[in-house]
Image (cartoon, rainbow, N blue to C red):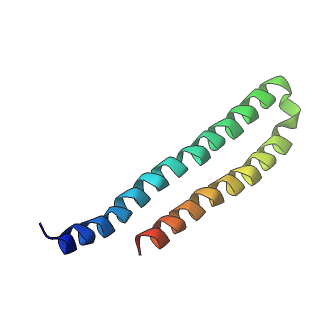
Amino acid sequence: MSAIQLAQDAVNLNQGLAAIGYGLAAIGPGIGVGLIFSSVISGTARQPEARGVLLSLAWTTFAIVEVLALIGFVVYFIATA
């Protein structure tokens, strides 16, 4: 293989690394969503009358956490371009 061919193969490595990076970045929001809704279930079990307030807070924080995952998705496409 020539040096030019090796250099071109090294450029294509960026897409694979970006995919691995996005996969690792998606772990955080996944754990966050699980913790949010487990806390809602626990709080509702302790104080059932607070269910409405807890759910509204849960959906708000869920949206914020999911935005972080979407930002990672956009960064993935920027890195592969």
Residue occupying the point 41% across, 76% down: 81
Looking at the rendered structure, the number of numbered marks drawn on it comes to 0
- Whether residue 61 sits left or right of residue 20 in the image: it is right
What residue is rendered at 50% in x and 47% in y? 24
Tell me the quarter of the picture where residue 4 sits.
bottom left
Q: Is residue 66 above or below residue 43?
A: below
Q: Residue furthest front?
A: 3
Give residue 65's position: percent from left, percent from top.
67, 52
- Residue 3 place in picture, x, y as percent: 20, 70
Q: Left or right: where does residue 72 sit relative to residue 2?
A: right
Q: Residue at horizontal 22%, vertical 67%? A: 6
Q: Choose between 22 and 36: the one closer to the eye.
A: 22
Q: Which residue is drawn at 43% across and 60% down?
A: 18
**In front: 10, or 44?**
10
User: Left or right of 66: which side holds 59?
Assistant: right
Residue 47 vs 75, above or below: the answer is: above
Quadrant that contains the N terminus: bottom left
Location of residue 68 in the rendering, given as x and y in whole percent from the top left corner? 63, 58
Q: In which quarter of the image is residue 17?
A: bottom left
| Residue that sits furthest to the top in the current view | 46
How far across and down, in percent of the image, does residue 80 sit? 41, 70
